[in-house]
Image (tube, rainbow, N blue to C red):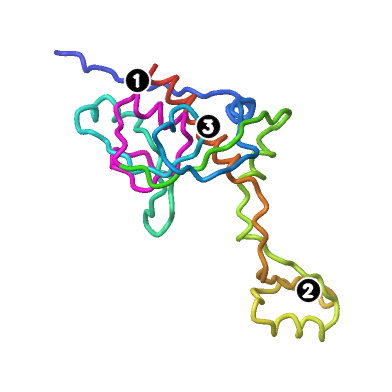
Amino acid sequence: MMKQRQRKTTSLNANNIYGWAMCKPLPIRGFEYMPDFDNWRNIPCILEVDLEHPKEPHDSLNDYPLALQGLMINKVEKLVLNLNDKEKYVIHHKNLKQYLYLSLRIKNIHCGISFKKGFFELMNNSVFGKTMENIRNRVDVRLVSKRKEAQRLSAKPNFKQLTIFNEDLIAIHMKRTKLVFDKPVYCGMSIFDIRKRLLYDSYYN
């Protein structure tokens, strides 16, 4: 009787991968829209591109596809690895060079922003989270102990919900009427891309 072939999987992890990425040069100043893209390989920049996945290398890329993508699955947005072409994909220039080396092709470059690089030192995962914070989800919570104040706030158009702790204390949840986009999302995005580059380089090279 023939023996069944056994298959095994190996799970690998990178220690302190965000800390490693934060030690790399990151965008900090000098942001400019790029008038042309002839020299994008030689300057630090973030690009919005259309990417093509050629059919030939599908088998070699199938286990760990390039260009992570946010897709709606059962009404929930999830990050998905796939071999589909990408449109208006925002990417760090070093990741784009890595993807081209691994057989992807650029169909079109829509726009780009160049920047000056610098080092952020002594950062950790919690600091990374602040660079990617979505301020749209913030809620203004008011603690009130008087009925009239609770009625006044709950009558406002930006009232969301309330939480009753006891007869003397209520939390009024209000949607913010003004948002200030003051988080360095460009920095967090670069950290996330640099982290992916290490994983792909470890797997393919």
Look at label 3 and name its amino acid. Pro
The C terminus appears in which quarter of the rendering? top left
Q: Which residue lies furthest to the front in this view?
A: 35
User: Mark 2 or 3 closer to N-term?
Assistant: 3
Nearest-to-viewer mark from 2 and 3 = 3
Please give the name of the residue rendered at 21% of the width and 17% of the height, measured from the top-left corner.
Answer: 4
Look at label 1 and name its amino acid. Lys
Image-based side of 123 in relation to 113, left or right: right
Look at label 2 and name its amino acid. Ile
Position in image of residue 18 (x %, y %)? 60, 31
Please give the label number shown on residue 44. 3
Nearest-to-viewer mark from 2 and 1 = 2
Q: What residue would you read off at disc 1? A: 8
Q: What residue would you read off at disc 2? A: 170
CA–CA distance in space, label 2 to label 3: 51 Å
Where is residue 47, by image quadrant? top left
CA–CA distance in space, label 1 to label 3: 41 Å
Please give the name of the residue rendered at 81% of the width and 82% of the height, measured from the top-left corner.
Answer: 149
Tell whether label 1 touches label 2 (CB within 8 Å).
no
User: Mark 2 or 1 closer to N-term?
Assistant: 1
- In the rendered image, the vertical position of residue 30 relative to residue 181, given as above or below: above
Where is residue 103, by image quadrant? top left
The N terminus appears in which quarter of the rendering? top left
- In the rendered image, the vertical position of residue 133 relative to residue 143, given as above or below: above
* Range covered by the magenta-colored residues: 80-107
Badge 1, how many Cα within 10 Å: few under 14, some, many 20+? few
Image-based side of 114 in relation to 58, left or right: right
